[in-house]
Image (tube, rainbow, N blue to C red):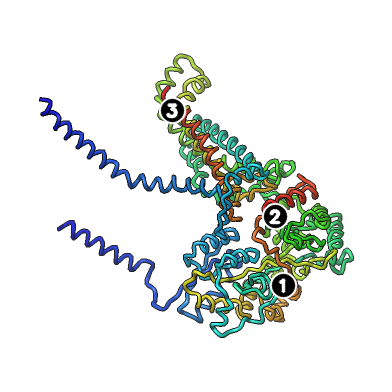
Amino acid sequence: MTSGLAPARRLRRLNMAKKASFFYLALAPAFIIVAFLTVYPLINVLYDSLFRYDFIRDTREFIGVTNFVRIAGESLFQRSFRNTVAFTASASILEVGLGVILALLFYGEFRGKRVAMTIIIFPMMISTMVISAIWQMMYHYEIGVLNYLLRMAGLYPVGWLIDTRIALSSVVLVDIWQWTPFAFLIIQAGLNSIPREYFESASIDGASYTQIVRRITLPILRSQIILVLMLRTIDTFRLFDKVYALTGGGPANATRTVSYFIYDEGFRYFNFGRASAASVYVLLFVSVLAVFYIRSMFKEGKQ
Amino acid sequence: MKRFVMCALLIGAMSVGSAFAGGAAEPDEVTLTIAGRDGAFGDALELATAEYSERNPDVRFEILKLSGPELLEQTVIELRGGRGAFDLVMIDDPFAPQMQEAGWLIDLEEMYDRHGVELDDDLIDNIVTLGRFPYSEDGTLYALPYVGNVSLFAYRDDIAGEYGFDALETWDDALEFARLVHENEPDMAPVLFRGVAGNPIVTGFMPIFASHGAQVLDDAGQPAFDSPEALEAVEFFLELAQYAPEGVVAYESAQVRDALLAGTGAMAIEVWPGWIGDMEDPEESEVVGLVNVAAHPRQIEPPAPLLGIWLLGIPVGSEHQEEAFDFLRFITSAEIQEKIARETGQAPTTESVHKIPDLIEQYHWYPAQLDALREGVARPRTDHWAEIESVLGDYLQQALIGDISAEEALERTQERVLEIMN
């Protein structure tokens, strides 16, 4: 009996192995492409960061971790890093917070809801460079509409983009204007997926609107909120285009970000070693944040 | 069989498609790709290329109109790769030595010899030198000057006259003039300059720096920002900047130009020919005949106009070097330089065009411009100029805002530039 079963089992195993090898073979091209597009550049950046690499002269000199040590000790990099963290924290938290508020406001039915939604979503669809040009005009110290309104109200004009204390907040405001709709859309999708019965029964039980939001809506939306927060954090940490177009990193480096620092090192001075080392710092920081968010999301999923 | 027929048809279709991709081209037709600048520079390139194609119907052009940083970025990446995508490149003169040292441009002297022609002696000698490597009159020629940009000084002649100035000859005169305008002309900005960090603020500051006897690099090639002359220059600049508009840290060329042409600025410590081409056009300007554009004032040292020449070179990888060379000679000839100057206001690089009477009538600063081009000084020839300019510009702007003192700005610049260079 056993000897009769053994060939059948072997045959099954062989079939399974065949299927598995076909499966891996089918996946291989996609895997190779993904590896080439993600893993290879990462290794390349890590490798370059260990060299004094002059792109124009095409000279490389191995200097170990010197680039990392030097950059970390430079006031410009420190300032860029602090600005980036401040921008990321304020922009992503405010965008998600406002996105939640908007989603709650738009949950009920009211007249003109579709028109209002279209208007709210509109900024997200415009190119960042166009948005920056519009806001640059609005922020203009002498001819901008914001200072015009302040003067009309008898107030002093504000140096939106020229005052070192305010410039970064002005850039945050533009980002909020552009990307709050993104947070709003994702959270609204989550909100619409919650069965209405939950809210109705809580309401019948006498729960107030605030209690329903705090005890039911927000806890259920937690994973969506974490997801949006993660996406916005990663995106805002890479801030470059708005700063490039609005302030050029100024005034006095008040809006200079790490991405801007990397751009200058890489494409203005062609010091690819230093640019790579700064990129590795960004990669590490964003990875830590991403791991934190992903763990929170998984924890939420298990609960 | 069916599969085979399908495959054959597909391959056939692909072959036909690829044969016709990119449109039909005449067998002898050549397309020259120029990596150039945007704005008025781009318009001038269009004008010259159209003229050339009219005379040489077999040569077509593709012009990439890029901003300054984009042009540098794309030029470096392309020329480093040596794929031959560009046949001519516009080069901001401080970056020329790096490109020449890297061996990315062809030796033009060899081309002149091969074609049995001579370098046009109408081109201004002082700016031809900028295209040579090493940077000296004896260096090998790798690029020709195409735009005669040089920084000049502009002030309202009428207002200066009212306050008893025949001319603003020294920087002290300029400061006094700014003070008087500040006290007596409430609707007018006494002094204008580009306050944006980096290249803009440094370019405006350099003539002050040089005329105070300060140097970026000393004779040994080491940074010299810790000199008393440098401190005096920065302190003077900050004193003068007190009379600049409140938003000056965000001022770029457009703001300086607009204020000057609208008649709301009394003096600009830095103007470039490309900004003021419309100054004598009544449709564009409120100050026709009222602004004197001259060489910079002197202080301890004589005026030191800063050269900002745009050069044109032919990359080694170009597959159309002969055609590119012919076009290069064409675009830098007096005939085309005159046409460009007349129609776009771009500053010429030839002596003779500066002396054409009706052009002098149109651009009354041409004699001063020619002097400045002959006497002007180049930015330091170092591979680190972009970084030095950026560092100095950052600290200068911080001093302008009042975050740090003039002394701190120079100390930090000196320290950082030393790190960069060593």
Q: Nearer the viewer, residue B24 or B127?
A: B127
Extreme residue toward the top, this view: A205
Name of the residue lying farthest toward the right: B164
Q: Secondary structure at mark 3?
A: helix
Instruction: Classify residue B7 by image quadrant.
Output: bottom left
Q: Secondary structure at mark 1?
A: helix
Q: CA distance from mark 1 to mark 3?
A: 68 Å
Query: Do the CB atoms of the residues marked 1 and 3 lie less than 8 Å apart?
Result: no
Which residue position is annotated with label 2? B251
* Apparent side of residue A226 relative to residue B212 in the rendered image (left or right): left
Residue under the point 54% across and 82% down: B114
Query: Looking at the picture, how far across and down is residue A237, in whole percent?
Result: 56, 41
Q: Is residue A81 visible?
A: yes
Task: Identify the mark at residue B373; answer none if there is no mark.
Answer: 1
Give B393 or B412, whichever is nearer the viewer: B412
Earlier-in-chain disc, 1 versus 2: 2
Report x, y in % for residue B355: 71, 80
Q: The disc labelled 2 sits on which kind of residue? A: Tyr
Marks 2 and 3, how far apart in space?
50 Å
Asked if the residues shown at circle 1 and circle 2 are in contact, with their CB atoms under 8 angstroms apart, the answer is: no
Query: Residue flagged by tag 3: what amino acid is it?
Result: Phe
Label ID, residue A298: 3
